[in-house]
Amino acid sequence: QLQLVESGGGLVQPGGSLRLSCAASGFTFDYSAIGWFRQAPGKERVGVSCISSSGAGTQYADSVKGRFTISRDNAKKTVYLQMNSLKPEDTAVYSCAAALYCSGPFGSWGQGTQVTVSA
């Protein structure tokens, strides 16, 4: 069973940067696409980015294109989400999850990490 743990969230000023990590345990990580999702207060969870098992394929929501970069280190069983030029509307709980492909369905959800963008 794949288990995922997010870290790296925090409070940052608008225009700042954060790097989120999604650390995995379990033998299926190398064969799993990993997606990042976020849920703002009072809103539904939405997909932010996804990376294929090999790392060759990446996807981004329009709202984060050009600002966020997803990457993975299979040797460390970790997926990263580099977030630059952060905006207040990026404030949310960010979670990662696994799937065979980025088209889903996703499972093995992590507990989430809070990102707050505020002056």
Image (spheres, helix red, strand yellow):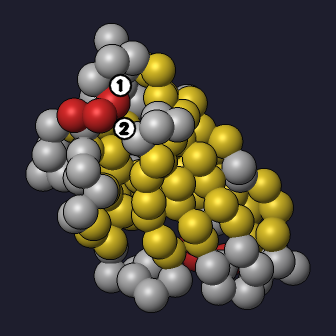
Q: Residue furthest right?
A: 119
Q: Which residue is mark 1?
A: 108
> Is residue 105 visible to us here?
no
> Is residue 86 visible to us here?
yes
Residue 97, how many percent across, how many down? 36, 38
Tag 1–tag 2 contact (CB < 8 Å): yes
Q: Which quadrant of the rendered structure holds the C terminus?
A: bottom right
Q: Residue furthest top?
A: 1
Residue at image position (43%, 52%) is 72
Residue at image position (39%, 17%) is 26
Which quadrant of the structure image shows residue 86? bottom right
Q: What is the spatial separation of the Cα atoms under label 1 and label 2, in whole angstroms?
A: 6 Å
- Assess disc 1: are there few (<14), some (14-19) or many (≥20) residues with their C-alpha within 10 Å of its C-alpha: some
Residue 94, how many percent across, how many down? 54, 50
Q: Which residue is mark 2?
A: 97
In this picture, residue 37 sits left or right of residue 51: right
Q: Residue furthest front?
A: 75
Q: Which of 29 and 39 lies nearest the eye of the viewer?
A: 29
